Amino acid sequence: SYQVKVADLPATVDSNKLDAEIKAVLNEIDSTMSTYRPESEVMRFNRSKAGDWFSVSPAVAELVAATLKISHETDGALDITVGPLVRLWHFGPKTRADAISPEQITPPSEESIAAARADVGYQKLDVRLEPPALRKQADKLEIDLSSVGEGYAVDRIVAVLEKNGIEDYLVGVAGAVRARGQRTDGKFWRAGVQKPTPDKDALQTTVTLNNAALATAGDYKRYFEFGGRHYSHIIDPSSGRPIDHSLASVTVVADKCVTADAWDTALLVLGSQRGQECAKQHDLAALFISRGEQGGQEFDVQETAAWQKRFPNALKDQPGQ
Ligand code: ADP
Ligand code: MG
């Protein structure tokens, strides 16, 4: 799902044409990057053999290069080769936990986790920008751009709007948003940060977004429960298992939405302490929400210095505006 709000459409812009342009961009992203489409570039690469360079569109190569940079900077917390583990834990396109009945969902065996881990590793993936291509060092290596796809799509829609001379907009794709300029009422756009619960209307805070993007990764978005435990769709590549710590969500604000969307997943995997250290090191504006020891609705919220600088107190903590 996506939304595009434009406050002041220039007279020269035809809204139907604009709509068609946006849909074309989204279709292009889908047909190159989706893991739900067997014939997408990404899926064809996933089926290909190791060894030779595999030609891809410039956008795929650039996105892969951007994620690999963050993989190196986070010791592999963000790793777009996690596909086999995502599937094993019932979060892949064909093994979606929500597509089968809850009783059928059980954690995989140690052996199957070890086997899937052997097929995962960003170090076994090479990227080249000129001419754009990917290369794998193991036949079974695959890529899954889900962790950054929403943010990337937002940036591409923004590019369409700006090309059309539009300067006051808010664009959102699932949990990722980017906004610039003002709303029709003259106020800045605002984005909410959800409490880490399934209730989409419960907000922890809202922030003003002026020429900035926000993305949130959370362990409450997709998960299954087994034996009283919670298994999230975010996988820690170092263990081969869903993340298992009190940090429930990370929100990142950055200039580009793809940057926010890549870092939110990486920092969530790192956990509260390592995540905050890493965010500080890279001067990221990030908000960390952890569950309290007692559970329930009490959360511990930590902001980085860059977040506080971007959002002075007066603009924070006014849910619903
Ligand atoms: P969401 O908005 O759904 O929470 P995220 O940006 O956090 O999205 O991405 C989650 C998706 O990324 C998962 O569904 C899975 O396909 C993939 N994924 C899971 N763990 C990792 C990881 N450590 N690195 C990269 N991608 C991951
Ligand atoms: Mg993400």
Image (spheres, helix red, strand yellow):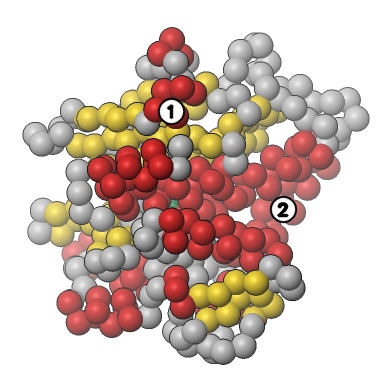
State whether label 2 is within 8 Å of ligand 1.
no
State whether label 1 is within 8 Å of ligand 2.
no
Three-letter code for the amino acid on which mark 1 is drawn? Trp
For residue 30, above or below residue 260 = below
Q: Nearer the viewer, residue 99 or 35?
A: 35
**208 with respect to 78 (left or right):** right
Q: Measured from the top left, where is residue 8 in percent x and y?
A: 76, 22
Quarter of the rendering containing residue 234:
bottom left
For residue 173, above or below residue 297 = below
Which residue is denoted by mark 2 in the rendering?
25
At x 53%, y 88%, the residue is 50
**95 with respect to 164 (left or right):** left
- Name the secondary structure under disc 2: helix
Picture quadrant of ligand 1: bottom left
Q: Measured from the top left, where is residue 36 in percent x and y?
A: 52, 67
Which residue is denoted by mark 1 in the rendering?
307
